[in-house]
Structure formats: C-alpha cells, structure tokens
Amino acid sequence: MNQFFLKSFRILLFPFSCLYAVIIVIRNFLYNKGIFHAATFNLPIICVGNLAVGGTGKSPMVEYLISLLHNNYAVATLSRGYKRKTKGYILANNNTTAIEIGDEPMQFHLKFPDVAVAVGEHRIIAIPQLLQDKPNTEVIVLDDAYQHRAINAGLNILLTEFSNLYCHDFYLPTGDLRDVKSSADRAQIIIVTKCPENLSESERRKITEQLLVKPHQKIFFTTIGYGTAYHITNNGQRQISSNDEVLLVCGIANPEPLKQYLHQNTHTYYFQSFPDHHIFSIDDLKEIEKRFSKIDHPSKYILTTEKDAVRLLKFRDVLENLPIYVLPIKPQFLFNEQATFDAAIISFIHNYNTNNGEKE
C-alpha cells in the first residue's frame, strides 16, 4: 500500500520531471558544443557510473577494477564521499574513518591499502591535488562520476540494473533517471548488473536491442557473486547454511538481492533495515543486540554488508563479542565474458599509454 501511494505521488510530480529533463538536455548540449569546457588529464581515467539514482552496483565494479589493476599499475580512486561529515579533498591515511571519507571509499581503503583512495566533491579540483599527493599514479578510477562532464574520462563504464533498465525509466522525481537516456551514447562499455544467474541468450539479445547499444559500445551482463562471510573484527570465516537463522542488518539502497539470497540459503532470516549510508549509533547497536537475543536457535548470527561494516567498526570493542559477520560481494560476468571485459580494460590503458608516448 505504501508503495502504491509513493508511486502515485511521484506520478503527480511529472511536470517537475519534464523541467528537470530540459535542464539536463541544455547542460549536456553546452558540454557537447564545447561551450562548457571539459578538462583532460595526461593519464588513463576510468569512470564508473549510471544514469539513475540508487544502487546499480558501482562500488563492487570499482572494487573489481582495483583488484584487476592494482598489482600492475599504481591505481588511485576518487569518489565524492557521499554522506561523509567533511568537505573538500581528503586522501585516506592510516587514521581515516568512514565518517571522514564515506563508507564506499573507506571500504576501498581497508581492502586495498596499497591503493590511493581520495574523496572530493569537485573532481576537477581533486584530481590535480591527488596527482600532487601521489605523483606516481598511473590510473585513476572515478567512482560515480558519469554526470561530471567537467572531466573527460578516457573510458566510461555505464551500469544499469536488470530490474530497472534506464531505457524503461523516467526522470526525477517521477522516475529515477538523473541524466537523459541519450547520455548512454558516451559510454564505451555498458554493463547490465544484478541479472539472474540463468539469464538466457534470447533475454540477452532483447535487452541489448532495448538499450540501443551502438557499434562502438561493448555490453556485458553480470550477476551478484557472494563470497564467504567473515567476522567483522577477527576475520574468522563462516559458511552460510540452510540450518542457520540470520539477523540481516543493513542500510543500503537496494537490499532485495541480498534478502533473496538469504531466503534461498538459510533456514530463516530476520531483517533489520536502516536508511542508505546510515551512520550507526550506540543505540542502534543495542537495538540490534536486543533483537538478536530474541532469536531462539542454536545456529544463529548477525549478517551485514561490507558497506555497513565500515560504519559499524567504530564499535569494535563491542563487536568483538558478537557473532556479526560480513558478506562480501563481487560482480560475476555471465556468458563467460570476464576475460573479454578484463582485456578491454587492459587494452584501454595500454593504448592510452602507447598513444601518449608513455613507458609501459
């Protein structure tokens, strides 16, 4: 019923969506004609983004790229640092917290300590600062920057969710689009995320046709791959079992795939929801403990996401005594195309460096 009223309310905002679309069209026109200037930097820059608000899997894709590249290149990531309590440019260090740089950048920093992780709401200002701090940087991965036309990224990776393709969506606030659909033409790679594992070849062709994929674009399809759960403080591993009863604690944009995974792989799960990017308080933690204590089952534990875990870690002393586990995820490429995607990324960097006369 709440979803019905929300949808009805958003439909009433249709005139505002039309006005928003006109503003975005004018802005893109000014960039396309060179009236608004876009800066180019002398190193390969990979932009990961989407046309819609909400969770399309940008953070797992950024992590995938970091994992692919960081052993062979000096990689840096730059994010806005959404919902952080600070402003301006910040480069993560050993004392950095999620409150300072945001949960996704903190997640990158913890998992890849050899990678430069920076945040800055104005990327055009942040990139020169990042290159000054890390002059040996060879590749920059921009997180959620598809709409930031002030920077010319050499490779644009556009994500769209299987259950909410941008071709079927409408503009904010009636729909979820924050950019016009024609902006998809700027992408060299389009990835349809969160697909069913058994996506058929006919469904693949249908979606490719619906998205009007251009000859210069490559399209890939991914599903969510779940790793082995690990304890939030001591990293002890735990396999998820059909005998388990789980309290799922999360504050992410779209928890539905995770809820479906637990529905299929556990005996029972209970869901304690928080807003996206929620900053946990000690009262939240007490409420979690209280609800967990009411579960009467010999095999029970608390499960959370990696994004939520970085915001919970400030209560490390309390968490050490709780069976709270973190479930990692990563994109899994369908149709045996992971090697093709990896090759496209490496080829972009190689060709960029070759064309610019830089040493490999």
Image: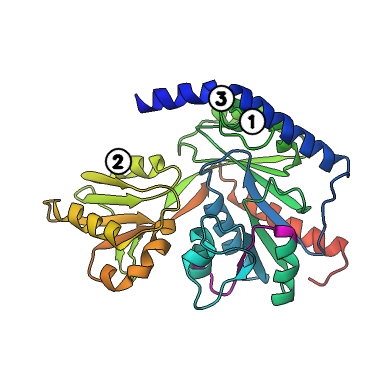
State left or right for residue 185 relative to residue 78. Answer: right
Which residue shows up at 66% across the image and 51% down it?
Answer: 145
Which of 308 and 47 lies nearest the eye of the viewer? 308
Whichever of callouts 2 and 1 sits on the residue coming sooner in the sequence is: 1
If the image is split into quadrants, where does the C terminus sit? bottom right
Q: Considering the numbered disc 2 on the image, is that residue within a helix, a strand or a loop? A: helix
Q: What percent of the width, then of the height, locates residue 277? A: 45, 53
Label 2 with label 1: CB-CB less than 8 Å: no
Q: Is residue 346 visible?
A: no
* Residues at marks 1 and 3, CA–CA distance in whole angstroms: 30 Å
Looking at the rendered image, the disc whose residue lies closer to the viewer, 2 or 3, is 3
What's the residue at 30%, 55% (across, down)? 303
**In the shown orientation, is residue 83 left or right of residue 91?**
left
Residue 357 image point, x, y percent: 88, 67
Q: Find disc 2 in the rendering and name its residue.
A: 264
Residue located at (82% from left, 56% from top): 39
Report how far apart the C-alphas of labels 2 and 3 lie in the structure: 38 Å
Q: Amino acid at mark 1?
A: Thr
Residue situated in front as seen by the camera: 319 or 242: 319
Q: Which residue is mark 1?
A: 208
- Which residues make up the magenta segment? 111-124
The residue indicated by pointer 3 is 13
Decide: marks 1, 3 in contact (CB < 8 A)?
A: no
Secondary element under disc 1, as helix, strand or loop, is helix
The crowd level at tag 1 (other Cα within 10 Å; few <14, some 14-19, many 20+) is some
Q: Residues within 10 Å of mark 3 (few under 14, many from 20)?
A: some
